[in-house]
Amino acid sequence: MPSLRFQVVSDAFKKHPLYVQSPKERPSEFFAKYVFNKQKMAKYLDKDTYSKMLDVIDNGSPLDRQTADKVADGMKQWAMELGVTHCTHWFQPLTNTTAEKHDAFVEHDGMGGMIEEFSGKSLVQQEPDASSFPSGGIRSTFEARGYSAWDPTSPVFVMGDTLMIPTVFISYTGEALDYKTPLLKGLQAINKAATAVVQYFNPEVKKVITNLGWEQEYFLIDEGLYSARPDLLLTGRTLMGHSSAKDQQMDDHYFGAIPERVAEFMKDLEIHALELGIPCKTRHNEVAPNQFELAPIYEECNLAVDHNMLIMSLMQKVARKHGFRCLLHEKPFDGINGSGKHNNWSLATDTGILLHGPGKDDLGNLRFITFVVETLMGVYKHNGLMKASIMSATNAHRLGGHEAPPVIISSFLGRQLTEVLNHFENSTDDTIYIAGKAGLKLDIPSIPELLIDNTDRNRTSPFAFTGNRFEFRAPGSEANCAAAMITLNAAVAEALVNFKERVDALIASGKEKTSAIIEILREDIKTCKPIRFDGNGYSDEWKEEAKRRGLDVEKSCPLIFDRYTDPETIKMFESLNIMNRKELAARNDIKWETYTKKVQIEARIFGDLSINHIIPQVVGYQTKLAENVAALKAILPEEQFSKVAQSNLSLISEISERIKVIEEGCEALTNARRVANKITSNREKAIAYHDTVEPIMDQVRYHIDKLEEKVDDEVWTLPKYREMLFMR
Ligand code: ADP
Ligand code: MG
């Protein structure tokens, strides 16, 4: 009987024509339809409350109870007009997903009936039971309380019948249990540090904001095929599977025509996203088959993080409507590109982007160089921590592969900016030299004149300057962007504070301001030189070179997490009031625990599949071969038989040998787990899983993939790479 796989595969190749009805309005008309933004506030709040809210949102003023009540009233009215019946605080625990607990608007009316109620108190604060969220031991089990508090800088929105209120999530003793709390504190820290430095150049600047434009990569796979792969279902990636004869070697997928079914999905997703105020802009095929990307217009960092969390959950929901599963894992398929989430980061004042160079005026240019150099200083000093901020059990499979940033943080500046810094470093006078943007005329009619960006491209760099921003390319596709942003903002804030202290000291000693700035910048350009690397980040020479330069070259995920509790890290986060020693230690405990659990689940399902899928089907095939050999022996003369049966006989013994390796490997896997599970320290346990459990899976997989190549296609139960990777 042919395996179930054939049914699933043939279903997958039938089209699912789920055409999306385009809304009648234009995107500009339905954009943010479900968001309680300033426009809605102006309509649903009285004048006084509205202006108080603006002060809360724009200047961080405290929100009093009376105003909160009035805001809640306006929100309730707006929400009920949309048919909303429930509300929830929406927060980001340390699990890479979001959490919500819905409460209905209803209350007793005291006369045996019910009324719709939504008070300022339920808007501002809730007390979800925190005991089931990771806390790294901060909150002992008998003190299970935590509370969530409204973040008014991220607007409230409606999903289905629920009013969603973005909140921070904090333990009762005040420690952060989420990503948003330290993110907001870090944004405050960089605002303060950067504003102080910008004021050297533009004294009227009051505020510096951080922008984030993420690019989200993902895979789509047919739902039926997904369901027939227990490894994908439980771990988000395939743990076995021979590579497809054709995958990405023809370079025919990147920017190729988007398959019809996928285009329908994207259209649907974008409509939902736009309605929720996510400014979707770009969509395209990525390099690997079935891999795609979505990028919005950049936004203020906190809002951009919320929008990324929201889009990830939307993607999964909308995908199912279209008969797909959306894979956000960083490496769902071995041997082809994995998925990342490029974080385009920049600083801006109330008057313009700070990393925008080169301007016409000298002071503007000096400001530009200051921010580039101090960004590099932060990233250089904390390069190991930057890596820790994006590291995870899943992203570890992608980093250092031949398509993803290497496991060493360095920065690519492009030729022109490199020349500027070199010139600056070596010149002896105080003149500043910056090359302007070069205009390139293309000699083809009807193509408009293009302005070459001041940066060339280097795809191998984890932290590249790209014209008016830095692009941090190492974050993983399923991660919360906040982790990377907390560290980057803190590192740059610290560098700016430090820069200002030294400049001020020179000024105090009588030096003229501009000369003082130039002197310190010259010093810093020399100091942070080791982080600058414009060559091929994938090469082996770079690994050696990086080690010589003193950059962090650690590859083991659990050991990379150690950077979070280094003395310089603790000093940085504590001095900027972002996180304290206790929170950092607790968060690391969660990281190690999560790492262990992920590998543990992989190892278990790997063992199961090997024993109850792979070996039985392979043995079945081997029996068939043996029967054939016996039949040949019965009818053929001896010397003819040995010639004819040769290939089957050697396949029979190859199968036996590989089965033996697989069985022994699975036993070794179980034993390694058993030993590791006895370890009580989360750090040591994660190290054991990394060093002793993971490598066995790789070794055994090799033999399974070889068998997939040899065994009759008809008996193979798991959908193959060539079936999963090509959408029609
Ligand atoms: P590419 O793939 O070439 O890097 P994309 O167009 O896919 O470019 O994505 C660029 C991302 O960078 C978008 O999200 C865009 O909004 C964002 N971006 C552009 N300028 C800035 C900036 N100054 N600060 C932050 N993000 C920016
Ligand atoms: Mg990019």
Image: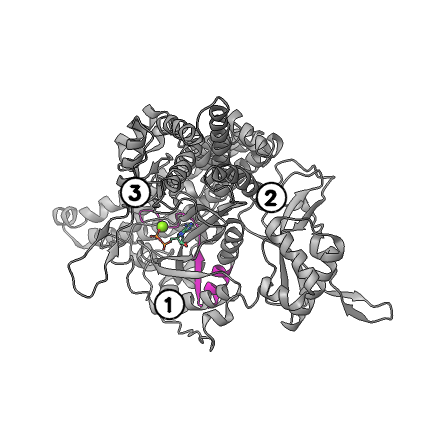
| Label 2 CB sits under 8 Å from any ligand 1 atom | no
Residue with the mark numbered 2 = 181
Residue with the mark numbered 3 = 402
Mark 3 surroundings: few (<14), some (14-19) or many (≥20) residues within 10 A:
some
Question: For the residues marked 3 and 2, what is the alpha-carbon distance in whole angstroms?
Answer: 35 Å
Q: Is residue 585 magenta?
A: no
Q: Is residue 334 magenta?
A: yes
Above or below, comparing residue 469 to residue 424 in the picture:
below
Above or below, comparing residue 483 to residue 282 in the picture:
above
Residue 302 shown left or right of residue 656 in the figure: right
Dot 2 lies on which element? helix
Assign the C terminus to one quadrant of the image. Answer: bottom left
Please provide percent x and percent y for residue 212.
46, 49
Please provide percent x and percent y for residue 183.
55, 43
Q: For the magenta stretch, what is the residue range?
A: 314-336
Residue with the mark numbered 1 = 263
3 or 2: mark nearer the eye: 2
Query: What kind of residue is marked 3?
Result: His
Please provide percent x and percent y for residue 622.
31, 50
Task: Determine the residue positioned at 52% across, 62% down.
Answer: 277
Residue 432 shown left or right of residue 30 in the figure: left
Mark 1 surroundings: few (<14), some (14-19) or many (≥20) residues within 10 A:
some
